[in-house]
Image (cartoon, grey):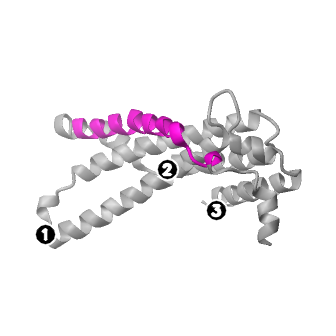
């Protein structure tokens, strides 16, 4: 079985899965969306704490519904792009949707961290501060990594605007049954997650 898998997937190299210089794009998108969102929360709290419109915008931005809906569609298009890896357009569509989902996740993360920094920690006892601090930092890390997975999938599809990624080019050389099986599996899981929400 091991030899069979090595023969089937031995064409992939480690560099096909490691972002390297492309990670700069993820950092740029993160800073462009999360930092202004964080600053907006702090600014609104300091100068306009009574403006309901700002508070409602922050609350709606933190809500995960938009990210979940677009993210599910992004996972679905990822599966379609894998299935149809010999065509360029599905990979372009998948990359755009996944990159936009990542940007929305970065915005949400910035709003969330801004709200977290404004919590009244001084009202908690020392052990509550420690427990809440450790737990919330862990959960923020999980949210950050979960959002990075979305960007990583967009990297796997297309790591530059004009061409498919090495992963997708090599996957294109595999038998259509492998591509279709992998792509349909991802697309079906995304579709089930979307429809069950």
- The percent coordinates of residue 116 (x first, y second) are 27, 53
Quote the CA–CA distance across marks 1 and 3: 41 Å
Could you tell me residue 76's position as x and y percent? Answer: 69, 49
Identity of the residue drawn at 81% across and 52% down: 179
Q: Nearer the viewer, mark 1 or mark 3?
A: 1
Q: Measuring 64% from the left and 56% from the top, which residue is drawn there?
A: 194
Q: Which mark is residue 196?
A: 3
Please tell me which residue lies in front, 60 or 109. Answer: 109
Q: Is residue 181 left or right of residue 194?
A: right
Question: Which labelled disc corresponds to residue 147?
Answer: 2
Front-most of 154 and 22? Answer: 22
**From what the image shows, is residue 59 above or below residue 161?**
below
Q: Quadrant of residue 39?
A: top left
| Lower position in the chain sequence, tag 1 or tag 3 | 1
Q: Label 3: how many residues lie within 10 Å, few (<14), some (14-19) or many (20+)?
A: few
- Element type at mark 2: helix
Q: Residue furthest top?
A: 162
Residue 90 in the image, given as x and y percentages of width and height: 75, 38
Specify the principal SS of the magenta part.
helix
Q: What's the distance in space between the residues labelled 1 and 2, CA to CA?
A: 31 Å
Q: CA distance from mark 2 to mark 3?
A: 20 Å
Give the residue displayed 68% in from the left and 39% down from the top.
Answer: 165
**Which residue was labeled with disc 1?**
126
**15 vs 162: above or below:** below
Find numbered disc 3 in the image and state the secondary structure of the residue it sits on.
helix
What is the crowding at mark 2: few (fewer than 14 residues within 10 Å), some, or many (at least 20)?
many
Q: Is residue 81 left or right of residue 152?
A: right
Magenta residues?
A: 15-43
């Amino acid at each position: 079985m091991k030899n069979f898998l090595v023969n089937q997937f031995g064409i992939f190299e480690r560099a096909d899965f490691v972002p390297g210089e492309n990670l700069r794009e993820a950092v740029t998108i993160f800073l462009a969306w999360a930092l202004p969102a964080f600053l907006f929360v702090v600014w609104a709290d300091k100068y306009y704490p009574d403006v309901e419109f700002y508070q409602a915008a922050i609350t709606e931005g933190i809500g995960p519904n938009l990210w979940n809906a677009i993210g599910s569609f992004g996972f679905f298009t990822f599966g379609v792009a894998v299935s149809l890896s010999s065509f360029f357009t599905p990979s372009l569509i998948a990359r755009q949707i996944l990159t936009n989902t990542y940007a929305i996740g970065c915005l949400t993360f910035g709003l969330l961290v801004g709200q977290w920094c404004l919590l009244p920690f001084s009202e908690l006892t020392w052990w509550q501060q420690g427990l809440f601090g450790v737990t919330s930092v862990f959960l923020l890390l999980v949210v950050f990594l979960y959002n990075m997975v979305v960007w990583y999938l967009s990297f796997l599809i297309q790591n530059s605007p004009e061409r498919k990624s090495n992963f997708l080019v090599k996957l294109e050389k595999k038998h259509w049954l492998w591509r279709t099986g992998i792509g349909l599996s991802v697309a079906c899981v995304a579709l089930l997650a979307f429809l069950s929400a």
